Image: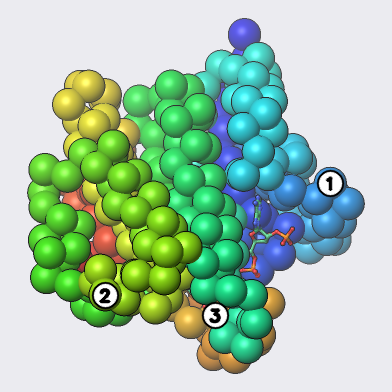
Amino acid sequence: MATKRLAVITGSNKGIGYGIARVLSKSFQGDVLATARDPKRGEAAIAELKTEGHEAKFFQLDITDLESIARLANYIKTEYGGLDILVNNAGIAYKSASTAPFSEQAAVSVKCNFNGTLNVCRQLFPLLRPHARVVNLSSMTSVNALHHCSNSLQQQFTDPKITMPQLEKLMDQFIKDTADGVHESNGWPSTAYGVSKIGVSVMSFILQRELDQQGKEDIVVNACCPGYVDTDMTSHKGPKTIDQGADTPAYLALLPPDITTPRGEYVTERKVEPWI
Ligand SMILES: NC(=O)c1ccc[n+]([C@@H]2O[C@H](COP(=O)([O-])OP(=O)(O)OC[C@H]3O[C@@H](n4cnc5c(N)ncnc54)[C@H](OP(=O)(O)O)[C@@H]3O)[C@@H](O)[C@H]2O)c1
């Protein structure tokens, strides 16, 4: 079986994910698999990378589709036998002008950003090799959203012993409370994206703890904020270029073996930030 090293990036047909694919195809000693939910957009990105002198392979991946994730896991297992870098970049955000009901925004945002990312981790983590690096794209919005949660929710989200089932239950509760029109009275902030990204940050800390408890050799998971970046998601209002936005995620993806920090942290501008 081939033992070539492999990096996988989700949602890499545009924006920060494209920028991360560009950095890794230059700096990572191995193959880069740039994934996208739409094959045409994904293949176009690979072709664009090629015109810039970068080599990447394409594989279709919709993080909200369990079968799509399973196909990717199977491909990695068969073709590479393991995985060395996983960048969970794919995500969505409703525009502030969106007229979609808040309950719909909550359900769709959490399903993609939180559950989608968690499902990718669940199916690909068994393939992580020793010294693998996992980067989850969270957001400074997760910290702001946390500050706007009730004291009780803040305590639960910052409990160092919180488990994944407890976190999933909280995310489900948010969706239910928005559907019942009681999310504000139950202490939730009115940001679907922000709450989904609280889930991404806390998930990252739990995943690190779980891997350590399993005795996995030097596998590091970090959450990060790329900064405010000029992409479709921000309607091109962010001041950072996609290369600048890709800097912290790529830095975390390329952390050297046996580092002690950052490890299971929330990172901005290559620096560990307190999570509250
Ligand atoms: N831009 C910022 O200032 C900023 C700040 C903080 C955090 N972030 C985070 O950084 C990440 C990248 O953001 P961005 O600004 O580059 O956004 P973007 O330009 O909108 O790109 C998002 C990428 O995710 C993909 N995607 C969305 N849903 C998907 C799904 N279900 N399965 C697979 N791929 C999916 C999109 O694919 P399609 O092209 O098919 O839609 C696209 O490739 C996101 O997680 C975002 O929350 C961004």
Q: Residue at x 65, y 82 (%)?
A: 99
Viewer-nearest of discs 2 and 1: 2
Residue bearing the label numbered 2: 185
Foreground of the two, 60 or 263:
60
- Coordinates of residue 235 in the picture (x, y in percent): 66, 85
The first of marks 2 and 3 along the sequence is 2
Disc ID at residue 173:
none
Distance from disc 2 to disc 1, alpha carbons, whole Å, reads 43 Å
Location of mark 3 (residue): 229
- Residue toward you, 22 or 267: 267
Q: Note whether residue 143 is visible.
A: no
Residue 39, numbered label: 1
Foreground residue, 126 or 178? 178
Of the numbered discs 1 and 3, the one sitting upstream in the chain is 1
Disc 2 is placed on an element classified as loop
Residue 266 pos. (x, y %): 27, 61
Q: Is residue 93 above or below residue 79?
A: below
Measure how far apart labels 1 and 3 are at the Cα level. 24 Å
The residue lying toward the viewer, choosing from 225 and 56, is 225
Note whether ligand 1 is within 8 Å of mark 3: yes
Side (left or right) of 122 relative to 213? right
Say few, some or many: other residues with alpha carbon within 10 Å of mark 1 (under 14 / 14 to 19 / 20 or more).
Answer: some
Label 2 and label 3: CA atoms lie apart by: 33 Å
Residue 271 % position (x, y)? 26, 69
